[in-house]
């Protein structure tokens, strides 16, 4: 759209979709653009289907924990948070009141939330931060969870987004490497100990040599190299589930009205 067309659209709606991703390794079988390619395609389809305004995708993210693998391009948490906030500030300048993030990389989440909090405090903007794996939280992806790095779901969504970024013959998802019999690592940053969980920030290379990982304990999901069920047809079906969910959420979020904040005393 030209600036004139944008001005006209913003007379009709005060909400936009903001796709975010990263450039980082995804094992031996997915291109380093996987995260932003997925977010970009999901947002593009949402825009076509719902008519929502979609921002250009922010391809780079917070991926320092992957940096030992070639091809990783990353920002620091503070830089990324500031970039997100300044984009929100720009949107506010032209009357945008609500933003739906379609985020494709977990490492971005904390900085996006912090920027959204600041935007709320500074100019009352409301942001909804969505991750496609959260949308598929209750889906069984052929016995796997959606949240796996270069796992079944991510491979399927990349296949539906940009088939040339997938090397299916090299696909494998490995179980998270264990280094202690009692502190059970489930991912690069989370572990189980007895009946509780503990957060231990690690590098991805600490828990996997390939870059892909189950993000669960090996007792829950073992290493697998069988990706035969991740077909173009299945990938398209999974993509549409995410797109449809967002198309239902966006108008509901657009109509969301919070009560006027007041202080009450006994």
Image (tube, grey):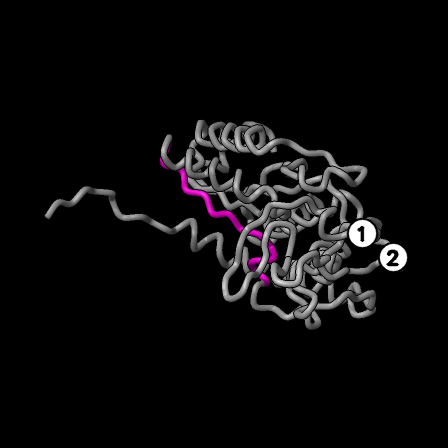
Q: Position of residue 249 (x, y in %)?
A: 48, 56
Dot 2 falls on a residue whose secondary structure is helix
Q: Label 1: which residue?
A: 210
Q: Position of residue 37 (x, y in %)?
A: 71, 46
> Which quarter of the picture shows residue 126?
top left
Q: Position of residue 263 (x, y in %)?
A: 18, 42
Left or right for 206, reference 84: right
Which residue is at 76% across, 39% downward?
Answer: 68
**Extreme residue in the right direction:** 169
**Label 1 crowding class (10 Å Cα cut-off): few <14, some 14-19, many 20+?**
some
Q: Label 2: which residue?
A: 170
Residue 119 inside the magenta-drawn segment: no
Residue 128 inside the magenta-drawn segment: yes
Q: Are marks 1 and 2 in contact (CB under 8 Å)?
A: no
Identify whether 205 is placed above or below 159.
above
Left or right for 202, reference 98: right
Q: Which stretch did the figure color magenta?
A: 123-136
> As rendered, which of 172 and 203 lies closer to the eye?
203
Left or right for 90, reference 256: right
**Label 2 crowding class (10 Å Cα cut-off): few <14, some 14-19, many 20+?**
few
In this orientation, does residue 155 appear? yes
Q: Position of residue 143 (x, y in %)?
A: 68, 72
Dot 1 falls on a residue whose secondary structure is loop
């Amino acid at each position: 759209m030209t600036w004139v067309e944008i001005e006209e659209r913003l007379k009709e709606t005060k909400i936009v979709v903001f796709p975010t991703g990263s450039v980082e390794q995804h094992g031996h079988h997915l291109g380093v653009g996987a995260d932003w390619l997925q977010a970009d395609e999901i947002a593009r389809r949402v825009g076509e289907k719902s008519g929502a305004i979609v921002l250009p995708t922010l391809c780079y993210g917070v991926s320092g924990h992957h940096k030992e693998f070639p091809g990783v391009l990353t920002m620091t948490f503070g830089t990324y948070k500031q970039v997100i906030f300044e984009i929100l500030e720009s949107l506010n300048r032209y009357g945008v009141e609500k933003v739906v993030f379609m985020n494709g990389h977990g490492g971005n989440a904390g900085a996006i939330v912090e920027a959204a909090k600041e935007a709320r405090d500074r100019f009352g903007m409301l942001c909804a931060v969505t991750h496609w794996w959260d949308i598929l939280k209750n889906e069984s992806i052929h016995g796997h969870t959606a949240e796996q790095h270069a796992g079944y779901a991510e491979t399927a969504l990349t296949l539906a987004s940009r088939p040339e970024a997938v090397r299916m013959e090299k696909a494998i998802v490995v179980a998270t490497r264990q280094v202690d019999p009692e502190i059970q690592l489930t991912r690069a940053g989370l572990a189980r100990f007895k009946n509780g969980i503990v957060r231990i920030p690690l590098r991805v290379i600490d828990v996997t040599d390939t870059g892909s990982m189950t993000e669960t304990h090996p007792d829950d999901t073992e290493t697998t190299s069988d990706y035969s069920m991740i077909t173009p047809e299945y990938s398209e079906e999974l993509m549409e589930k995410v797109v449809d969910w967002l198309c239902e959420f966006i108008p509901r979020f657009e109509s969301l009205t919070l009560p006027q904040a007041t202080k009450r005393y006994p």
